[in-house]
């Protein structure tokens, strides 16, 4: 345990940031699963909406530093491929 006041503050800040980053990553997983479910249903309008929401959250997570930019690019590419698969079928 830290004895220095500034380090105690830094530990609290780091914990808050860790929880926030976890929330972003968890929500991205949830929205990806929701997109997959929507693709199975086949409704083009809702697929577009879900895909847009997922891409927006991924971009926000990168801006906040919760995701690496290459990880975000990979997740967005996978989501785009998933969303496009319904129009190709």
Image (cartoon, rainbow, N blue to C red):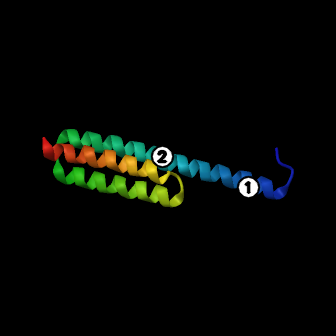
The numbered disc on residue 10 is 1
* Mark 2 burial class by Cα count in 10 Å: few <14, some 14-19, many 20+: some
Q: Nearer the viewer, residue 71 or 40?
A: 71
23 relative position to 10: left or right: left
Image position, residue 31 (x, y; %)? 36, 46
Image position, residue 63 (x, y; %)? 49, 61
**Alpha carbons under labels 1 and 2: distance apart:** 22 Å
Provide the secondary structure element on which disc 1 rests. Answer: helix
* Mark 1 burial class by Cα count in 10 Å: few <14, some 14-19, many 20+: few
Mark 1 vs 2, N-terminal side = 1
Provide the secondary structure element on which disc 2 rests. Answer: helix
17 relative position to 26: left or right: right
Image: 20 above or below 82 = below
Residue at the (17%, 44%) spot, across then down: 86
Residue at the (50%, 51%) spot, across then down: 68
Split into 4 quadrants, where in the image is the C terminus?
top left
Split into 4 quadrants, where in the image is the N terminus?
top right
Image position, residue 22 (x, y; %)? 53, 46
3 relative position to 15: left or right: right
Question: Cβ–Cβ below 8 Å for labels 1 and 2?
Answer: no
Residue at the (46%, 44%) spot, across then down: 26
Residue at mark 2:
25
53 relative position to 88: left or right: right
């Amino acid at each position: 345990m830290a004895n220095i006041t500034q380090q105690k503050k830094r530990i609290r800040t780091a914990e808050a940031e860790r929880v926030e980053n976890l929330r972003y990553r968890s929500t991205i997983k949830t929205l990806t699963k929701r997109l997959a479910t929507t693709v199975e249903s086949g409704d083009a309008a809702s697929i577009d909406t879900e895909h847009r929401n997922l891409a927006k959250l991924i971009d926000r997570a990168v801006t906040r530093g919760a995701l690496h930019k290459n990880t975000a690019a990979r997740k967005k590419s996978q989501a785009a491929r998933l969303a496009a698969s319904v129009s190709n079928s």
